[in-house]
Image (cartoon, rainbow, N blue to C red):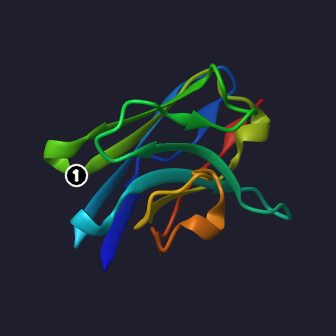
Amino acid sequence: QVQLVESGGGSVQAGGSLRLSCAASGNILSANCMGWFRQAPGKPREGVAAIYIGGSNPYYGDSVKGRFIISQDKAKNTVYLQMHSLKPEDTAMYYCAAAPRRTYYPLKMGEYDYWGQGTQVPVSS
């Protein structure tokens, strides 16, 4: 089992920046890939960003490319999502997730077994 706890959410104005953190604990060696997902009211959950543990090549959803950056601190067992140039359409609950297997689809929900409780990010215009 892997436990994930997100933090860093909060209200922000359009054009602003915010950094989310995801602290992992438990059997973290079973995590192969870490991802960030988001879900806005009435919309399906979508993949935002993902990175393999110890890897250097991140993956981003089209709607956040060039604005969001995913990174990891292995010593702290923490994954970050730095968000810049936020837009009202970025408003959502943001979730951290861990996948136990290497995947060719790092932005697909079904590849992930472990999920955090989420942190809310409202972006006002």
Using the image, determine if residue 114 lies above or below residue 5: below
Q: Quadrant of residue 12?
A: top right
Percent x, y of residue 6: 40, 57
Using the image, determine if residue 3 lies above or below residue 58: below
Callout 1 amino acid: Asn
- Considering the image in quadrants, where does the N terminus appear? bottom left
For the point 34% across and 63% down, the residue is 31
Using the image, determine if residue 121 lies above or below residue 82: below
Residue nearest the observer in this picture, 117 or 72:
72
- In the current view of this chain or complex, which residue is farthest to the right? 42
| In this rendering, position of residue 61 left or right of residue 97 | right
- In the current view of this chain or complex, which residue is farthest to the bottom? 1
Residue named by callout 1: 77
Percent x, y of residue 71: 38, 34
- Considering the image in quadrants, where does the C terminus appear? top right
Q: Quadrant of residue 94?
A: bottom right
Q: Secondary structure at mark 1?
A: loop
For the point 28% across and 41% down, the residue is 54
Percent x, y of residue 120: 57, 55
Percent x, y of residue 62: 74, 33
For the point 86% across and 64% down, the residue is 42
| In this rendering, position of residue 31 left or right of residue 85 | left
